[in-house]
Image (cartoon, grey):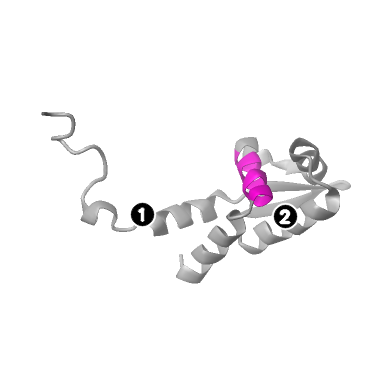
């Protein structure tokens, strides 16, 4: 993942409604949720939610599909994993991360 893509994703998540929306869609899993259900669960007006969904879509964090008259949104876990991989690339100087063997010993 390129630096610019990571910055765009992090920027999209750096807003309360968008972060809550993304977390809700992660919890919903691959089936996703209709925009109307997202709005009700988060108590966000349709016009405001539309703006936030557009920003998350632009960042590649969510996707959508049409089901009848509903637009169903889902989290794009591949993008999330890409951001996490970028942030943790070469974590711990290349050594496996975890609790050091000497931790807790005194």
Q: Position of residue 6 (x, y in %)?
A: 50, 63
Real-space CA distance between mark 1 and mark 2, rounded to the nearest whole angstrom = 27 Å
- In-front residue for pair 51/33: 51
- Residue occupying the far left of the picture: 106
Q: Position of residue 73 (x, y in %)?
A: 72, 48
Q: Is residue 20 magenta?
A: yes
In the image, residue 73 above or below residue 101: below
Residue 31, quarter of picture: top right
In the image, residue 63 above or below residue 38: below
Q: Residue, x 73% and y 60% (percent of image)?
A: 54
- Residue occupying the far front of the picture: 106
The disc placed on residue 106 is none
Q: Position of residue 61 (x, y in %)?
A: 60, 55
In-image side of 23 versus 89 (left or right) = right
Q: Which residue is mark 1?
A: 88
Q: Position of residue 44 (x, y in %)?
A: 79, 45
Q: Residue, x 26% and y 40% (percent of image)?
A: 98
User: Looking at the figure, which quarter contains the C terminus?
Assistant: top left
- Judge the density around disc 1: few (<14), some (14-19), many (≥20) Cα neighbours within 10 Å: few
In the image, residue 103 above or below residue 90: above
Q: Which residue is mark 2?
A: 53
Q: Residue, x 65% and y 40% (percent of image)?
A: 24
- Residue occupying the far right of the picture: 69
Q: Main secondary structure of the magenta part?
A: helix
- In-front residue for pair 76/56: 56
- In-front residue for pair 61/44: 44
Residue 87, quarter of picture: bottom left
* Highlighted range, magenta: 16-26
Q: Is residue 68 magenta?
A: no
The first of marks 1 and 2 along the sequence is 2
In-image side of 65 versus 97 (left or right) = right
- As helix, strand or loop, the secondary structure at mark 1 comes to helix
């Amino acid at each position: 993942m390129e630096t610019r893509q990571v910055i765009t994703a992090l920027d999209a998540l750096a807003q309360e409604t968008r972060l809550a929306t993304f977390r809700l869609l992660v919890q919903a899993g691959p089936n996703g949720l209709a925009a109307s259900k997202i709005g009700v669960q988060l108590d966000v007006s349709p016009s405001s939610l539309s703006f936030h969904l557009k920003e998350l879509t632009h960042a590649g964090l969510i996707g959508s599909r049409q089901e009848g008259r509903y637009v169903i949104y889902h989290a794009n876990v591949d993008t999330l994993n890409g951001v996490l991989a970028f942030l943790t690339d070469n974590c711990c100087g290349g050594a496996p991360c975890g609790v050091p063997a000497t931790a807790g010993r005194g």
